[in-house]
Image (cartoon, rainbow, N blue to C red):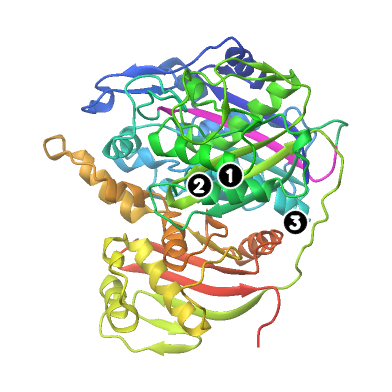
Amino acid sequence: MVYKIADDIISPLGEGTEQNYQALSHGNSALSTYTHLWNLPEPFAASLFTDDQRKKYQVSGLTLFESLLYHSISRALKDTSIDVHQDRVVLIVSTTKGNIGLLESSDFTEERIYPGIAAKTVSDRLGLDSVPITVCNACISGTAALILAERLLDAGFYDYAIVSGTDIQNKFIVSGFQSFKALSAEPCLPFDMERTGLNLGEAVATVILSRKQVEPHSWIIKQGKICNDAYHISSPSKQGEGSYKALLGALQGESMNHLALVNVHGTATMYNDQMESVAVQHASLSDLPANGLKGYYGHTMGAAGLLETIITMKSLDYHRILGTKGFTELGVSGKINISASSRDTDKTSFVKLISGFGGCNAALFATKDEHGVNEVSIPQNLFKAHHVTISTQRIVVDGKELVTESIGKDMLSEVYKTKIGGYPKFYKMDLLSRLGFIASELLLQVSGDDRDKETDDRAVVLFNRTSSIHSDRIHQKDISDEENYYPSPSVFVYTLPNIVTGEIAIRNHYHGETSFYVLPEKDENIMKQVFLSTFQDSGIKSILGGWIDAEDESHLDADFYLLTTNKMN
Protein backbone atom coordinates (compact mmCIF):
# COMPACT_ATOMS: atom_id res chain seq x y z
CA MET A 1 0.00 0.00 0.00
CA VAL A 2 1.12 3.57 -0.67
CA TYR A 3 0.34 7.01 0.71
CA LYS A 4 -1.01 10.10 -1.05
CA ILE A 5 1.10 13.13 -0.17
CA ALA A 6 -0.26 15.65 -2.71
CA ASP A 7 -2.84 16.07 -5.45
CA ASP A 8 -4.13 18.63 -7.92
CA ILE A 9 -7.01 19.12 -10.34
CA ILE A 10 -7.36 21.72 -13.09
CA SER A 11 -10.70 21.67 -14.89
CA PRO A 12 -13.22 24.07 -16.44
CA LEU A 13 -14.78 24.22 -12.95
CA GLY A 14 -11.69 25.51 -11.21
CA GLU A 15 -8.02 25.34 -10.33
CA GLY A 16 -6.98 23.10 -7.48
CA THR A 17 -8.69 20.20 -5.72
CA GLU A 18 -10.44 22.35 -3.12
CA GLN A 19 -11.94 24.71 -5.70
CA ASN A 20 -13.15 21.79 -7.77
CA TYR A 21 -14.72 20.08 -4.79
CA GLN A 22 -16.52 23.25 -3.73
CA ALA A 23 -17.93 23.66 -7.24
CA LEU A 24 -19.32 20.13 -7.13
CA SER A 25 -20.67 20.53 -3.59
CA HIS A 26 -22.73 23.47 -4.89
CA GLY A 27 -24.02 21.38 -7.79
CA ASN A 28 -22.09 23.21 -10.50
CA SER A 29 -21.47 21.55 -13.83
CA ALA A 30 -19.22 22.60 -16.71
CA LEU A 31 -21.26 20.79 -19.36
CA SER A 32 -22.51 22.84 -22.32
CA THR A 33 -23.89 21.98 -25.74
CA TYR A 34 -21.66 22.78 -28.73
CA THR A 35 -22.96 23.17 -32.27
CA HIS A 36 -20.71 23.12 -35.36
CA LEU A 37 -17.57 23.13 -33.19
CA TRP A 38 -14.61 21.89 -35.31
CA ASN A 39 -17.11 21.75 -38.22
CA LEU A 40 -18.65 18.60 -36.79
CA PRO A 41 -22.08 17.90 -38.31
CA GLU A 42 -23.80 16.91 -35.04
CA PRO A 43 -24.14 18.90 -31.80
CA PHE A 44 -22.67 17.43 -28.61
CA ALA A 45 -22.47 18.34 -24.94
CA ALA A 46 -19.06 18.52 -23.30
CA SER A 47 -17.04 20.14 -20.52
CA LEU A 48 -14.27 22.07 -22.29
CA PHE A 49 -11.66 24.61 -21.20
CA THR A 50 -12.42 28.16 -22.29
CA ASP A 51 -10.12 29.99 -24.70
CA ASP A 52 -8.88 32.10 -21.78
CA GLN A 53 -8.07 28.99 -19.76
CA ARG A 54 -6.20 27.45 -22.69
CA LYS A 55 -4.10 30.60 -23.06
CA LYS A 56 -3.44 30.68 -19.32
CA TYR A 57 -2.09 27.14 -19.19
CA GLN A 58 -0.17 27.16 -22.46
CA VAL A 59 3.59 26.81 -21.88
CA SER A 60 6.05 27.93 -24.55
CA GLY A 61 7.56 24.98 -26.38
CA LEU A 62 4.92 22.55 -25.11
CA THR A 63 1.61 21.43 -26.59
CA LEU A 64 -1.56 22.12 -24.61
CA PHE A 65 -1.64 18.44 -23.57
CA GLU A 66 1.92 18.68 -22.25
CA SER A 67 1.32 22.12 -20.73
CA LEU A 68 -1.60 20.87 -18.63
CA LEU A 69 0.48 17.99 -17.30
CA TYR A 70 3.34 20.36 -16.52
CA HIS A 71 1.13 22.86 -14.66
CA SER A 72 -0.73 20.28 -12.58
CA ILE A 73 2.40 18.30 -11.65
CA SER A 74 4.25 21.51 -10.73
CA ARG A 75 1.36 22.62 -8.52
CA ALA A 76 1.24 19.24 -6.75
CA LEU A 77 5.01 19.12 -6.25
CA LYS A 78 4.90 22.45 -4.37
CA ASP A 79 3.12 20.63 -1.54
CA THR A 80 5.99 18.13 -1.15
CA SER A 81 9.70 18.14 -0.40
CA ILE A 82 10.53 15.69 -3.18
CA ASP A 83 13.83 16.14 -5.01
CA VAL A 84 12.85 15.29 -8.58
CA HIS A 85 16.51 15.08 -9.62
CA GLN A 86 16.83 11.49 -8.49
CA ASP A 87 16.04 8.18 -10.11
CA ARG A 88 13.80 7.07 -7.22
CA VAL A 89 10.95 9.22 -8.55
CA VAL A 90 8.87 7.86 -11.45
CA LEU A 91 6.45 9.80 -13.65
CA ILE A 92 3.41 7.84 -14.81
CA VAL A 93 1.19 9.58 -17.36
CA SER A 94 -2.32 8.35 -18.15
CA THR A 95 -3.92 9.30 -21.46
CA THR A 96 -5.91 7.80 -24.27
CA LYS A 97 -4.91 10.04 -27.19
CA GLY A 98 -2.30 12.47 -25.86
CA ASN A 99 -1.04 14.79 -28.63
CA ILE A 100 -3.27 13.29 -31.31
CA GLY A 101 -4.27 16.80 -32.46
CA LEU A 102 -0.78 17.13 -33.96
CA LEU A 103 -1.84 14.83 -36.81
CA GLU A 104 -3.30 17.93 -38.47
CA SER A 105 -0.60 20.34 -37.31
CA SER A 106 2.96 21.11 -38.37
CA ASP A 107 3.88 23.07 -35.21
CA PHE A 108 5.85 20.20 -33.67
CA THR A 109 7.85 17.21 -34.85
CA GLU A 110 5.80 14.13 -35.70
CA GLU A 111 7.41 12.15 -32.87
CA ARG A 112 5.56 14.33 -30.33
CA ILE A 113 2.38 12.49 -31.37
CA TYR A 114 3.76 9.41 -29.63
CA PRO A 115 2.57 9.48 -25.98
CA GLY A 116 5.91 8.29 -24.61
CA ILE A 117 7.78 11.10 -26.33
CA ALA A 118 5.25 13.64 -25.02
CA ALA A 119 5.67 12.26 -21.49
CA LYS A 120 9.46 12.44 -21.83
CA THR A 121 9.15 16.08 -22.97
CA VAL A 122 7.20 16.93 -19.79
CA SER A 123 9.55 14.85 -17.65
CA ASP A 124 12.59 16.68 -19.02
CA ARG A 125 10.96 20.08 -18.45
CA LEU A 126 10.29 19.10 -14.82
CA GLY A 127 13.87 17.91 -14.35
CA LEU A 128 13.05 14.26 -13.71
CA ASP A 129 15.81 11.73 -14.40
CA SER A 130 13.85 8.45 -14.57
CA VAL A 131 12.13 7.07 -17.67
CA PRO A 132 8.42 8.02 -17.73
CA ILE A 133 5.77 5.34 -18.28
CA THR A 134 2.58 6.18 -20.18
CA VAL A 135 -0.53 4.12 -19.50
CA CYS A 136 -2.75 3.80 -22.59
CA ASN A 137 -5.48 1.51 -21.34
CA ALA A 138 -8.54 3.29 -22.78
CA CYS A 139 -10.95 4.74 -20.21
CA ILE A 140 -9.39 2.92 -17.26
CA SER A 141 -5.98 4.55 -17.87
CA GLY A 142 -6.08 6.84 -14.82
CA THR A 143 -7.09 4.09 -12.40
CA ALA A 144 -4.66 1.65 -14.02
CA ALA A 145 -1.89 4.24 -13.59
CA LEU A 146 -2.61 4.47 -9.85
CA ILE A 147 -2.55 0.67 -9.59
CA LEU A 148 0.78 0.56 -11.46
CA ALA A 149 2.21 3.24 -9.16
CA GLU A 150 1.12 1.35 -6.06
CA ARG A 151 2.76 -1.82 -7.35
CA LEU A 152 6.04 -0.18 -8.40
CA LEU A 153 6.40 1.53 -5.03
CA ASP A 154 5.44 -1.58 -3.08
CA ALA A 155 8.04 -3.52 -5.06
CA GLY A 156 10.69 -1.01 -3.97
CA PHE A 157 11.64 0.15 -7.46
CA TYR A 158 10.87 3.79 -6.53
CA ASP A 159 10.20 5.88 -3.43
CA TYR A 160 7.74 8.29 -5.08
CA ALA A 161 5.37 8.17 -8.02
CA ILE A 162 3.94 11.21 -9.79
CA VAL A 163 0.76 10.08 -11.54
CA SER A 164 -0.85 12.61 -13.87
CA GLY A 165 -3.50 12.24 -16.56
CA THR A 166 -5.25 14.33 -19.17
CA ASP A 167 -6.77 14.38 -22.65
CA ILE A 168 -7.62 17.30 -24.94
CA GLN A 169 -10.88 17.00 -26.85
CA ASN A 170 -10.81 17.63 -30.59
CA LYS A 171 -12.40 16.63 -33.87
CA PHE A 172 -10.45 13.34 -33.92
CA ILE A 173 -11.94 12.13 -30.63
CA VAL A 174 -15.45 13.57 -30.84
CA SER A 175 -16.02 12.32 -34.39
CA GLY A 176 -15.02 8.83 -33.28
CA PHE A 177 -17.47 8.72 -30.40
CA GLN A 178 -20.17 10.18 -32.66
CA SER A 179 -19.54 7.34 -35.12
CA PHE A 180 -20.58 4.98 -32.31
CA LYS A 181 -23.71 7.08 -31.68
CA ALA A 182 -22.48 7.26 -28.08
CA LEU A 183 -22.66 11.03 -27.44
CA SER A 184 -25.57 13.02 -26.08
CA ALA A 185 -26.30 16.57 -27.25
CA GLU A 186 -27.59 17.36 -23.75
CA PRO A 187 -25.96 17.04 -20.31
CA CYS A 188 -25.71 13.36 -19.45
CA LEU A 189 -28.05 11.44 -17.12
CA PRO A 190 -26.07 8.64 -15.44
CA PHE A 191 -28.11 5.54 -14.55
CA ASP A 192 -31.30 7.38 -15.42
CA MET A 193 -34.12 5.80 -17.40
CA GLU A 194 -33.94 8.72 -19.87
CA ARG A 195 -30.18 8.58 -20.46
CA THR A 196 -29.15 8.97 -24.11
CA GLY A 197 -25.35 8.91 -24.07
CA LEU A 198 -22.15 10.28 -22.65
CA ASN A 199 -20.52 13.70 -22.63
CA LEU A 200 -16.80 14.20 -23.11
CA GLY A 201 -14.71 16.46 -20.91
CA GLU A 202 -11.34 18.08 -20.35
CA ALA A 203 -9.35 18.16 -17.11
CA VAL A 204 -5.93 17.30 -15.76
CA ALA A 205 -5.46 15.52 -12.45
CA THR A 206 -2.32 14.62 -10.52
CA VAL A 207 -1.64 12.41 -7.51
CA ILE A 208 1.76 12.10 -5.84
CA LEU A 209 2.29 8.87 -3.93
CA SER A 210 4.94 7.90 -1.39
CA ARG A 211 6.19 4.47 -0.44
CA LYS A 212 6.36 5.62 3.18
CA GLN A 213 3.87 7.57 5.25
CA VAL A 214 4.78 11.26 5.50
CA GLU A 215 1.88 12.48 7.65
CA PRO A 216 -0.57 10.61 9.90
CA HIS A 217 -4.08 9.91 8.61
CA SER A 218 -3.02 10.13 4.97
CA TRP A 219 -5.09 8.61 2.23
CA ILE A 220 -3.85 5.14 1.35
CA ILE A 221 -4.19 3.38 -1.97
CA LYS A 222 -4.10 -0.13 -0.67
CA GLN A 223 -4.70 -2.38 -3.65
CA GLY A 224 -6.22 -2.60 -7.10
CA LYS A 225 -7.31 -5.13 -9.67
CA ILE A 226 -7.55 -5.08 -13.48
CA CYS A 227 -9.66 -7.69 -15.31
CA ASN A 228 -10.92 -8.26 -18.84
CA ASP A 229 -14.43 -9.20 -19.92
CA ALA A 230 -13.03 -11.36 -22.76
CA TYR A 231 -16.33 -10.54 -24.49
CA HIS A 232 -16.12 -7.69 -27.04
CA ILE A 233 -13.71 -4.86 -27.87
CA SER A 234 -16.34 -2.09 -27.79
CA SER A 235 -19.28 -3.44 -25.76
CA PRO A 236 -19.22 -4.40 -22.08
CA SER A 237 -20.19 -7.87 -20.95
CA LYS A 238 -23.89 -8.01 -20.12
CA GLN A 239 -23.05 -9.91 -16.94
CA GLY A 240 -20.45 -7.31 -15.95
CA GLU A 241 -17.97 -10.15 -15.41
CA GLY A 242 -14.79 -8.08 -15.67
CA SER A 243 -16.06 -5.33 -13.38
CA TYR A 244 -17.34 -7.88 -10.87
CA LYS A 245 -13.98 -9.65 -10.76
CA ALA A 246 -12.16 -6.31 -10.44
CA LEU A 247 -14.37 -5.32 -7.49
CA LEU A 248 -13.73 -8.61 -5.72
CA GLY A 249 -9.98 -8.27 -6.26
CA ALA A 250 -9.81 -4.69 -5.01
CA LEU A 251 -11.84 -5.55 -1.90
CA GLN A 252 -10.08 -8.82 -1.12
CA GLY A 253 -9.53 -9.06 2.63
CA GLU A 254 -11.43 -5.85 3.37
CA SER A 255 -14.50 -5.50 5.56
CA MET A 256 -17.57 -4.04 3.90
CA ASN A 257 -18.31 -2.28 7.20
CA HIS A 258 -15.58 0.26 6.51
CA LEU A 259 -16.83 1.26 3.03
CA ALA A 260 -18.50 4.62 2.50
CA LEU A 261 -19.30 4.16 -1.19
CA VAL A 262 -18.44 2.77 -4.58
CA ASN A 263 -17.54 5.50 -7.06
CA VAL A 264 -18.64 4.13 -10.43
CA HIS A 265 -17.79 4.98 -14.05
CA GLY A 266 -21.37 6.09 -14.84
CA THR A 267 -20.93 7.24 -18.44
CA ALA A 268 -24.70 7.47 -19.05
CA THR A 269 -24.51 5.16 -22.04
CA MET A 270 -27.18 2.48 -22.16
CA TYR A 271 -24.86 -0.50 -21.83
CA ASN A 272 -22.16 0.79 -19.48
CA ASP A 273 -24.54 1.84 -16.73
CA GLN A 274 -26.52 -1.38 -17.07
CA MET A 275 -23.34 -3.47 -16.86
CA GLU A 276 -22.05 -1.60 -13.80
CA SER A 277 -25.33 -2.02 -11.95
CA VAL A 278 -25.21 -5.79 -12.54
CA ALA A 279 -21.56 -5.96 -11.40
CA VAL A 280 -22.27 -3.96 -8.24
CA GLN A 281 -25.22 -6.20 -7.36
CA HIS A 282 -23.24 -9.36 -8.11
CA ALA A 283 -20.47 -8.13 -5.77
CA SER A 284 -23.05 -7.71 -2.96
CA LEU A 285 -22.58 -3.93 -2.90
CA SER A 286 -26.18 -2.99 -3.73
CA ASP A 287 -26.89 -1.42 -0.34
CA LEU A 288 -23.66 0.61 -0.37
CA PRO A 289 -24.10 4.22 -1.56
CA ALA A 290 -22.84 4.69 -5.11
CA ASN A 291 -22.16 7.80 -7.13
CA GLY A 292 -20.80 8.96 -10.46
CA LEU A 293 -19.25 12.32 -11.40
CA LYS A 294 -19.74 12.49 -15.18
CA GLY A 295 -22.68 14.89 -14.77
CA TYR A 296 -20.23 17.52 -13.50
CA TYR A 297 -17.15 16.93 -15.67
CA GLY A 298 -18.21 14.68 -18.52
CA HIS A 299 -15.91 11.80 -19.41
CA THR A 300 -12.39 13.18 -19.07
CA MET A 301 -10.83 10.00 -20.49
CA GLY A 302 -7.18 9.76 -19.37
CA ALA A 303 -7.90 11.99 -16.38
CA ALA A 304 -11.14 10.29 -15.31
CA GLY A 305 -9.84 7.63 -12.92
CA LEU A 306 -7.48 10.09 -11.24
CA LEU A 307 -9.89 13.02 -11.02
CA GLU A 308 -12.73 10.91 -9.65
CA THR A 309 -10.46 9.25 -7.07
CA ILE A 310 -9.17 12.63 -5.86
CA ILE A 311 -12.66 14.14 -5.63
CA THR A 312 -13.97 11.10 -3.74
CA MET A 313 -11.10 11.39 -1.24
CA LYS A 314 -11.81 15.10 -0.78
CA SER A 315 -15.55 14.57 -0.35
CA LEU A 316 -14.97 11.95 2.35
CA ASP A 317 -12.63 14.40 4.09
CA TYR A 318 -15.76 16.56 4.35
CA HIS A 319 -17.81 13.49 5.40
CA ARG A 320 -19.95 13.77 2.28
CA ILE A 321 -20.94 11.49 -0.58
CA LEU A 322 -21.62 13.73 -3.55
CA GLY A 323 -24.84 13.28 -5.45
CA THR A 324 -24.95 11.92 -9.00
CA LYS A 325 -25.84 14.97 -11.08
CA GLY A 326 -28.33 14.27 -13.87
CA PHE A 327 -29.86 11.24 -12.17
CA THR A 328 -33.61 11.20 -11.47
CA GLU A 329 -35.14 7.75 -11.86
CA LEU A 330 -33.30 4.44 -11.96
CA GLY A 331 -33.09 3.00 -15.48
CA VAL A 332 -30.98 -0.14 -14.96
CA SER A 333 -31.95 -3.65 -13.91
CA GLY A 334 -29.17 -4.17 -11.38
CA LYS A 335 -29.77 -3.00 -7.84
CA ILE A 336 -27.53 0.02 -7.19
CA ASN A 337 -27.87 2.73 -4.53
CA ILE A 338 -27.65 5.91 -6.67
CA SER A 339 -28.92 9.27 -5.44
CA ALA A 340 -29.05 12.74 -6.95
CA SER A 341 -28.63 14.23 -3.48
CA SER A 342 -25.46 14.34 -1.43
CA ARG A 343 -25.36 12.15 1.67
CA ASP A 344 -23.49 12.31 4.97
CA THR A 345 -21.04 9.62 6.04
CA ASP A 346 -18.52 9.01 8.81
CA LYS A 347 -16.65 6.30 6.89
CA THR A 348 -13.31 6.85 5.21
CA SER A 349 -12.87 4.02 2.72
CA PHE A 350 -14.16 3.56 -0.82
CA VAL A 351 -13.74 1.53 -3.95
CA LYS A 352 -13.33 3.12 -7.39
CA LEU A 353 -14.73 1.21 -10.39
CA ILE A 354 -14.13 1.95 -14.07
CA SER A 355 -14.28 0.18 -17.45
CA GLY A 356 -13.27 0.82 -21.05
CA PHE A 357 -12.95 -0.31 -24.65
CA GLY A 358 -10.96 -3.46 -25.17
CA GLY A 359 -12.98 -5.18 -22.44
CA CYS A 360 -10.81 -3.70 -19.67
CA ASN A 361 -12.08 -3.07 -16.15
CA ALA A 362 -10.32 -1.77 -13.05
CA ALA A 363 -11.09 -1.19 -9.39
CA LEU A 364 -8.99 0.16 -6.54
CA PHE A 365 -9.51 0.34 -2.80
CA ALA A 366 -8.57 3.56 -0.98
CA THR A 367 -8.81 4.21 2.74
CA LYS A 368 -7.75 6.40 5.64
CA ASP A 369 -8.22 3.49 8.01
CA GLU A 370 -4.80 1.98 8.65
CA HIS A 371 -6.05 -1.36 9.99
CA GLY A 372 -4.24 -4.30 8.45
CA VAL A 373 -1.02 -4.00 6.47
CA ASN A 374 -0.75 -5.61 3.06
CA GLU A 375 1.63 -8.55 2.84
CA VAL A 376 3.26 -7.95 -0.53
CA SER A 377 5.08 -10.79 -2.25
CA ILE A 378 7.57 -9.58 -4.83
CA PRO A 379 8.96 -12.20 -7.24
CA GLN A 380 12.70 -11.95 -7.80
CA ASN A 381 13.06 -13.66 -11.17
CA LEU A 382 11.31 -13.85 -14.52
CA PHE A 383 11.54 -16.84 -16.83
CA LYS A 384 10.74 -16.79 -20.55
CA ALA A 385 9.01 -20.10 -21.19
CA HIS A 386 8.69 -19.43 -24.95
CA HIS A 387 9.70 -16.63 -27.30
CA VAL A 388 8.40 -15.28 -30.64
CA THR A 389 9.88 -12.40 -32.63
CA ILE A 390 8.39 -10.84 -35.75
CA SER A 391 10.01 -8.20 -37.94
CA THR A 392 8.90 -6.92 -41.32
CA GLN A 393 10.73 -9.75 -43.10
CA ARG A 394 10.99 -12.72 -40.74
CA ILE A 395 9.35 -14.67 -37.93
CA VAL A 396 11.26 -16.69 -35.35
CA VAL A 397 9.59 -19.08 -32.89
CA ASP A 398 11.75 -20.41 -30.05
CA GLY A 399 14.85 -19.78 -32.13
CA LYS A 400 13.52 -21.44 -35.29
CA GLU A 401 12.71 -19.28 -38.31
CA LEU A 402 9.42 -19.81 -40.13
CA VAL A 403 9.69 -20.00 -43.89
CA THR A 404 7.39 -17.44 -45.53
CA GLU A 405 7.00 -16.16 -49.09
CA SER A 406 5.79 -12.65 -48.20
CA ILE A 407 6.82 -9.75 -46.02
CA GLY A 408 5.07 -7.13 -43.88
CA LYS A 409 1.30 -7.18 -43.63
CA ASP A 410 1.05 -9.88 -46.31
CA MET A 411 3.34 -12.10 -44.26
CA LEU A 412 0.93 -11.88 -41.32
CA SER A 413 -1.97 -12.95 -43.56
CA GLU A 414 0.10 -15.79 -44.98
CA VAL A 415 0.94 -17.13 -41.53
CA TYR A 416 -2.69 -16.82 -40.46
CA LYS A 417 -3.82 -18.90 -43.47
CA THR A 418 -1.08 -21.54 -43.26
CA LYS A 419 -0.49 -21.86 -39.52
CA ILE A 420 -3.63 -20.70 -37.71
CA GLY A 421 -6.99 -20.19 -39.49
CA GLY A 422 -10.45 -20.68 -38.04
CA TYR A 423 -10.80 -17.15 -36.66
CA PRO A 424 -12.09 -14.88 -39.46
CA LYS A 425 -12.25 -11.88 -37.12
CA PHE A 426 -8.52 -11.63 -37.90
CA TYR A 427 -9.39 -9.84 -41.14
CA LYS A 428 -11.33 -7.13 -39.27
CA MET A 429 -8.39 -6.25 -37.03
CA ASP A 430 -6.08 -3.30 -37.53
CA LEU A 431 -2.38 -3.80 -38.28
CA LEU A 432 -1.25 -3.62 -34.63
CA SER A 433 -3.84 -6.19 -33.52
CA ARG A 434 -3.00 -8.52 -36.41
CA LEU A 435 0.63 -8.39 -35.43
CA GLY A 436 -0.20 -9.12 -31.78
CA PHE A 437 -2.67 -11.84 -32.73
CA ILE A 438 -0.15 -13.71 -34.91
CA ALA A 439 2.64 -13.39 -32.32
CA SER A 440 0.39 -14.63 -29.51
CA GLU A 441 -1.02 -17.50 -31.58
CA LEU A 442 2.43 -18.78 -32.49
CA LEU A 443 3.57 -18.41 -28.90
CA LEU A 444 0.61 -20.33 -27.53
CA GLN A 445 0.94 -23.06 -30.14
CA VAL A 446 4.41 -23.97 -28.88
CA SER A 447 3.32 -23.66 -25.25
CA GLY A 448 0.64 -26.34 -25.71
CA ASP A 449 -2.01 -24.36 -23.81
CA ASP A 450 -5.61 -25.57 -23.56
CA ARG A 451 -7.16 -22.95 -25.85
CA ASP A 452 -10.78 -23.65 -24.87
CA LYS A 453 -10.35 -23.15 -21.13
CA GLU A 454 -11.33 -19.83 -19.57
CA THR A 455 -8.75 -18.51 -17.15
CA ASP A 456 -8.28 -15.67 -14.67
CA ASP A 457 -4.61 -16.27 -13.97
CA ARG A 458 -2.93 -15.08 -17.18
CA ALA A 459 -2.23 -11.41 -17.87
CA VAL A 460 -1.54 -9.76 -21.22
CA VAL A 461 0.94 -6.89 -20.74
CA LEU A 462 2.34 -5.13 -23.80
CA PHE A 463 4.54 -2.10 -24.58
CA ASN A 464 5.38 -0.01 -27.62
CA ARG A 465 6.62 3.37 -28.81
CA THR A 466 4.18 4.58 -31.49
CA SER A 467 0.88 3.73 -29.78
CA SER A 468 -1.80 3.14 -32.46
CA ILE A 469 -0.36 5.50 -35.06
CA HIS A 470 -1.28 3.38 -38.10
CA SER A 471 -5.00 3.40 -37.25
CA ASP A 472 -4.76 7.03 -36.09
CA ARG A 473 -3.68 8.09 -39.58
CA ILE A 474 -6.52 6.15 -41.20
CA HIS A 475 -9.13 7.75 -38.93
CA GLN A 476 -7.62 11.20 -39.47
CA LYS A 477 -7.92 10.72 -43.24
CA ASP A 478 -11.57 9.68 -42.85
CA ILE A 479 -12.47 12.96 -41.11
CA SER A 480 -10.19 15.44 -42.93
CA ASP A 481 -12.12 15.81 -46.18
CA GLU A 482 -15.40 17.55 -45.36
CA GLU A 483 -16.95 16.43 -48.65
CA ASN A 484 -16.08 12.81 -47.90
CA TYR A 485 -16.40 12.95 -44.12
CA TYR A 486 -16.95 9.43 -42.85
CA PRO A 487 -15.68 8.45 -39.39
CA SER A 488 -15.90 4.68 -39.06
CA PRO A 489 -16.49 3.05 -35.66
CA SER A 490 -14.61 -0.03 -36.87
CA VAL A 491 -11.54 2.16 -37.48
CA PHE A 492 -11.90 4.48 -34.47
CA VAL A 493 -11.96 1.68 -31.89
CA TYR A 494 -8.51 0.59 -33.04
CA THR A 495 -7.10 4.06 -32.36
CA LEU A 496 -6.73 2.73 -28.81
CA PRO A 497 -3.54 0.65 -28.62
CA ASN A 498 -4.86 -1.54 -25.79
CA ILE A 499 -7.41 -3.07 -28.18
CA VAL A 500 -4.75 -5.61 -29.16
CA THR A 501 -4.70 -6.89 -25.56
CA GLY A 502 -8.50 -7.17 -25.69
CA GLU A 503 -8.37 -9.11 -28.95
CA ILE A 504 -5.93 -11.59 -27.41
CA ALA A 505 -8.07 -11.90 -24.27
CA ILE A 506 -11.25 -12.54 -26.27
CA ARG A 507 -9.57 -15.12 -28.52
CA ASN A 508 -8.19 -17.06 -25.55
CA HIS A 509 -10.90 -16.50 -22.91
CA TYR A 510 -8.53 -14.60 -20.61
CA HIS A 511 -10.25 -12.76 -17.77
CA GLY A 512 -7.01 -11.71 -16.12
CA GLU A 513 -5.29 -8.34 -16.42
CA THR A 514 -4.80 -6.67 -19.80
CA SER A 515 -2.55 -3.59 -19.82
CA PHE A 516 -0.80 -1.48 -22.47
CA TYR A 517 2.09 0.92 -21.87
CA VAL A 518 3.93 3.35 -24.14
CA LEU A 519 7.60 4.20 -23.59
CA PRO A 520 9.86 6.82 -25.23
CA GLU A 521 12.05 3.93 -26.41
CA LYS A 522 12.20 0.21 -25.79
CA ASP A 523 13.58 -0.21 -22.27
CA GLU A 524 14.04 -3.76 -20.98
CA ASN A 525 14.61 -2.59 -17.39
CA ILE A 526 11.30 -0.67 -17.21
CA MET A 527 9.48 -3.57 -18.84
CA LYS A 528 10.94 -5.99 -16.28
CA GLN A 529 9.84 -3.71 -13.42
CA VAL A 530 6.28 -3.65 -14.74
CA PHE A 531 6.20 -7.41 -15.33
CA LEU A 532 7.50 -8.18 -11.84
CA SER A 533 5.07 -5.73 -10.26
CA THR A 534 2.17 -7.29 -12.19
CA PHE A 535 2.95 -10.60 -10.49
CA GLN A 536 2.15 -8.91 -7.15
CA ASP A 537 -1.44 -9.75 -8.08
CA SER A 538 -1.58 -13.19 -6.46
CA GLY A 539 -4.13 -14.28 -9.03
CA ILE A 540 -1.66 -13.91 -11.92
CA LYS A 541 0.45 -17.01 -12.61
CA SER A 542 1.80 -16.15 -16.07
CA ILE A 543 2.07 -13.17 -18.42
CA LEU A 544 1.86 -13.09 -22.18
CA GLY A 545 3.92 -9.98 -22.67
CA GLY A 546 6.48 -8.04 -24.60
CA TRP A 547 6.99 -5.37 -27.22
CA ILE A 548 4.69 -4.72 -30.18
CA ASP A 549 4.99 -1.85 -32.67
CA ALA A 550 3.42 -1.33 -36.08
CA GLU A 551 4.23 2.17 -37.28
CA ASP A 552 3.13 1.25 -40.81
CA GLU A 553 2.98 -1.81 -43.05
CA SER A 554 6.74 -1.65 -43.64
CA HIS A 555 7.75 -1.33 -39.98
CA LEU A 556 6.65 -4.29 -37.86
CA ASP A 557 8.31 -5.24 -34.58
CA ALA A 558 7.03 -7.85 -32.15
CA ASP A 559 8.97 -9.50 -29.35
CA PHE A 560 6.59 -11.73 -27.38
CA TYR A 561 7.27 -14.15 -24.56
CA LEU A 562 5.40 -16.27 -22.06
CA LEU A 563 6.60 -15.16 -18.64
CA THR A 564 6.47 -17.01 -15.34
CA THR A 565 8.15 -16.56 -11.97
CA ASN A 566 8.98 -20.27 -11.75
CA LYS A 567 11.19 -22.03 -14.25
CA MET A 568 9.16 -24.41 -16.39
CA ASN A 569 10.52 -27.72 -17.61
Q: Which residue is mark 2?
A: 240
According to the picture, the residue beneath numbered tag 1 turns out to be 282
Q: Residue at x 34, y 26 (%)?
A: 184
Q: Quadrant of residue 205?
A: top right
Residue at the far left in the pictured view: 483
Q: Earlier in the sequence, mark 2 or mark 3?
A: 3
Labels 3 and 1: the sequence-earlier one = 3
Q: Is residue 358 visible?
A: yes
Tag 1 secondary structure: helix
CA gap between label 3 and label 1 equals 36 Å
Prevailing SS of the magenta stretch: strand
Q: Position of residue 64 (x, y in %)?
A: 46, 31
Real-space Cα distance between discs 2 and 3? 34 Å
Q: Which residues are magenta?
A: 199-213
Find disc 3 in the rendering and name its residue.
157
Residue sitting at x 31%, y 67%? 426
Q: Quadrant of residue 420?
A: bottom left
Comparing labels 2 and 3, the label whose residue is closer to the camera: 2
Q: Is residue 2 left or right of residue 74?
A: right
- Left or right: where 132 falls relative to 44: right
Q: Secondary structure at mark 2?
A: loop
| 529 relative to 164, above or below | below
Residue positioned 47% across, 75% down in the render: 451
> x%, y% of residue 492?
31, 46
Under circle 3, the secondary element is: loop
Q: Earlier in the sequence, mark 1 or mark 2?
A: 2
Q: What kind of residue is marked 3? A: Phe
Percent of width and height locating residue 156:
78, 56
Q: Is residue 87 magenta?
A: no
Amino acid residing under circle 1: His
